[in-house]
Image: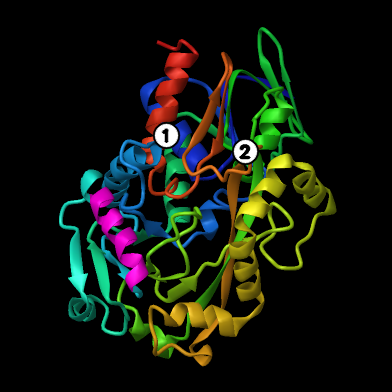
Amino acid sequence: MSVQYDIIFIGGGIVGTASALKLLEKKNLRILLIEAEDNLAKHQTGNNSGVIHSGLYYKPGSLKALNCTRGREMLYKFCEEHSIPHERCGKIVVATDESELTQLKMLEERGIANGLVGIKRLTKEEIKEYEPFANGIEALYVPQTGIVDYVSVTNKYAKLIMKNGGEIKLKSKAVSIKVNCNQIVVCTEEDEFKSKYLVNCGGLYSDKVAKMSGVNPDVKIIPFRGEYYKLKKDKQHLVKNLIYPVPDPQFPFLGVHFTRMIHGGVEAGPNAVLAFKRTGYKKSDIDISQITEMLLYPGFWKMAKKHYKMGWEEFKRSFSKKLFVKSLQKLIPDLTEDDIIPGGAGVRAQALDRYGKLLDDFRIIQTDKMIHVLNAPSPAATASLSIGETISDMIIKNFKLN
């Protein structure tokens, strides 16, 4: 069956649904969103730690900083209006060694530059007032950080999309895309959909969708698996809210941390190990063709040369509960191996350029008929409504929909 639409969105994660929703709030268009899986938010959106980020870490003026600080407040308001469980609980970022104090001060300065009111430097003694079991020589308290269930948020976006006249089709994986001067044809295994324009929010497969549509993404998506443990119920009192380490500025990951979840329980993690499949949630998930693609990409070896020491440490920690706990004990010394049990895992779609650089900011490519979101790292979930505003404005301007 062939159906004509104004715009097709590919990808049913939080960025795709937020962008489609924001566009429908501005324009009366025939919009279709297709998702390969049988549910929305099946991958990055549904497997993260549920943190509403403050904007502390990001370079002032960057897309990350601007979208996070704006999107955070938009998300809190959205959750309140639609009765989605959430909590603005705050977090602390803890320095456990003198060598981390310079980076902690830089984070404080960034937070202030990004408009975080009430951010506070804590002494060793004051840390205990916020997290009685946390260990550190100094810390930052960040009141804007919160927790939420992003699957619930995405499903609410989807309901509003359909309420505003949009269509969503699950189990609809794009297998080919034909672009000509008059229209774009997106073929799934069962259907064929025609539209004037295309927006690619394909996450883990965003580079492949771009190539399928004839666009050179100029990056390769490299999957990194983040593995979590959970605190046993009788040990959850060790964490009141959220406890983070001072991150390594050379690596685009935040390090293992403790997160109280909105529906109860406390997660510990994640680490960051190279996955051998784009949806490689288990160590045994391996796709030889995808591994070959990674190994043949010139940027992969440049990245490996630059980060092999860090990668090796993360890999060892992935197979050693003892090493994982040792990392966690830097923040909570009282924690033991018996206090945690295996939790879930998520896979991050990390864009890598041909020079071996792991992209830290958002990357969006535009053509006269298409927009491709090729890197939407954390805090993309927090910033989803702001990113949706940005992308919807780009669509209206770029596709001349005024």
Secondary structure under the numbered disc 1 in the rendered image: helix
* Horizontal side, residue 143 vs residue 282: left or right: left
Secondary structure under the numbered disc 2 in the rendered image: loop
Vertical placement of residue 225 versus 220, above or below: below
Question: Residue at the left extreme?
Answer: 118
Residue 95 in sight here: no
The image quadrant of residue 263 is bottom left
On the image, the x and y values in percent for residue 237 come to 34, 85
Q: CA distance from mark 1 to mark 2?
A: 25 Å
Q: Quadrant of the C terminus?
A: top left
Neighbourhood count class around disc 1 (C-alpha, 10 Å): few under 14, some 14–19, many 20 upward: many
Q: Nearer the viewer, residue 38 or 206?
A: 206
Identified by mark 1, the residue type is: Gly
Identified by mark 2, the residue type is: Asp
On the image, the x and y values in percent for residue 230 come to 50, 78
Vertical placement of residue 168 versus 247, above or below: above
Vertical placement of residue 9 versus 356, above or below: above
Instruction: Name the disc covering residue 353, or none.
Output: 2
Residue 305 in sight here: yes
- Residue at 31% across, 47% down: 72
* Horizontal side, residue 112 vs residue 279: left or right: left
Neighbourhood count class around disc 2 (C-alpha, 10 Å): few under 14, some 14–19, many 20 upward: many
| 222 is within the stretch colored magenta | no
On the image, the x and y values in percent for residue 66 come to 32, 38
Magenta range is 98-111
The residue at which mark 1 appears reads as 388
On the image, the x and y values in percent for residue 226 come to 57, 63
* Horizontal side, residue 376 vs residue 219: left or right: left
Vertical placement of residue 215 versus 57, above or below: above
Q: Nearer the viewer, residue 123 or 262?
A: 123
- Residue at 71% across, 34% down: 174
